[in-house]
Amino acid sequence: MDIILKNALVAHEDQPVRAADIAIEGERIAAVEPGITAEAGETIDCGGRLVSGPLIDPHVHLDAVLTANLEPNVSGTLHEGIANWAKQKKIRDLESVKARARQAIDWEIAQGAGFIRTHADTSDEGQLSMRALLEVKDEVSDRVDLQIVAFPQDGIHSHPGGPELFVRALDMGPDVIGGIPHNEATREAGVASLKLIFDEAEKRGLLIDAHCDEVDDPNSRFTEVMAHETYYRGMQGRVTASHCAAMHSYANAYAFRLFGWLERGGLNVIANPFDNLILLAREDTYPKRRAMTRVKELWQAGITVGIGHDSIMDPWYPLGRGDMVQAASLTLHVCQMSGMAEIDACFDMVTWKNAEILALEDYGVAPGCRADLAVFDAASKADVLRINPACTHVFKRGKLVAATTPASRTVMGQSVDLTLGN
Ligand code: FE2
């Protein structure tokens, strides 16, 4: 064996967390069982820490990260963010976009991420976002796997030449096709954009992940179009609707009818709590909507739900540090998922549920899985959410790529441990 992780608490999918050692050979997990005695090149004592597949950020805009201070968003609104982004796109250059993306990627890895799906804005003729992120994808492939979504921020069918511009971006080789139907000029243009996206995905064999109904308007109903197209074309599991914030404001009768089509279509949903909570429902006084999709009810209905970070210090959201546990914790609170099984479900959403959305194979902590692992300084999924602990080790394909020393706390000179000592 190359590496043996001793005294781990293993979290694999929905199986109960159990004590075991983990043996790694090459890029794969060879064994997960108690008391492994085989010789190993390196042995690491996990000391009863939780070991799971790495965190996954399935929705972030790496072409815009770390730009919040370049043109501060004074009002904090979506509209000012869009205006600032348009200004930045005129003056940015390839190397600075790449440098900021790499920095944010390293922040995410240091906190336990092993896979990232990023959107790349395809709305400019020069395709600077696509070029930058395709290069970054190769440059960081030793430490993280990136999926690139071709994302038409300004819409596809609302501008002359828009479809042709978007198809040219698809020819550059993204992994996933994006969209933004609610941002098209009319309902008809939004539906037409989705038809094009599905046609191209079928033709090219690509996954789909569209921003969908990221508004407070209960009349924004493109998620139903995505669910039906997914069902009708037999693309179950390969299509994701991101945000779906309007679902918060749908009448219950419509929302639960929609759930049936989401289930039938096998359409995945990604919630993005940081941006949605900050940017949406701004016109509300009180009561003020939470502007989040119905994570708990979708999860209860058996629909695959994931959680994304979306923004890290960009024109829309000035905060954030690339911490997917924080994103899960925020979802837990906003969606009132405080039952014990619900807390575990929030951890699952940023690990193996996000892996399902990214269509990853061999993800997890079982023999034969790829040795992509994260070791958390906590003893349970719930404690990861409660403490937001250091991620002490992150492995990518059997290699240690990130390490963090847990904080040392004392009161009156005595050590204080935030766990209950289990
Ligand atoms: Fe987004």
Image: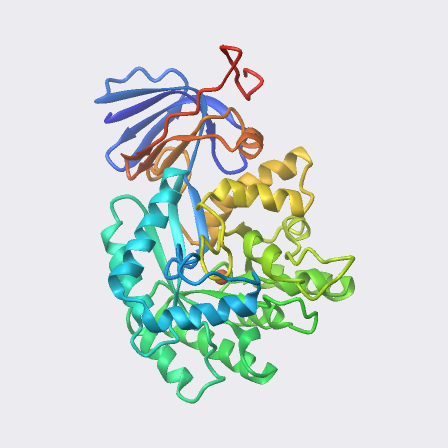
Question: Residue 147 appears at what percent x and percent y?
Answer: 36, 57
- Quadrant, the C terminus: top right
Instruction: Name the outermost residue toward the bottom.
Output: 160
Question: Residue 224 appears at what percent x and percent y?
Answer: 62, 70
Task: Give the answer, above or below, for where 129 lies relative to 3.
Answer: below
Task: Give the answer, above or below, for where 360 lies relative to 185.
Answer: above
Q: State which quadrant residue 166 falls in.
A: bottom left
Question: Residue 194 appears at what percent x and percent y?
Answer: 51, 76
Task: Give the answer, above or below, for where 117 lies relative to 348.
Answer: below
Residue beneath the point at 53% across and 16% down: 416
Mark yes or no: residue 83 visible: yes
Q: State which quadrant residue 390 falls in.
A: top left
Which of the pair 388/137 is nearer the observer?
Answer: 388
Task: Give the answer, above or below, for where 405 lies relative to 411.
Answer: below
Which of the pair 313/164 is nearer the observer?
Answer: 313
Residue beneath the point at 46% across and 43% down: 323
Which of the pair 294/362 is nearer the observer?
Answer: 294
Relative horizontal placement of residue 401, taking residue 50 as reference (left or right): left
Q: Describe the colour scheme in one phrase.
A: rainbow
Mark yes or no: residue 179 visible: no
Question: Residue 130 appears at what percent x and percent y?
Answer: 32, 67
- Quadrant, the N terminus: top left
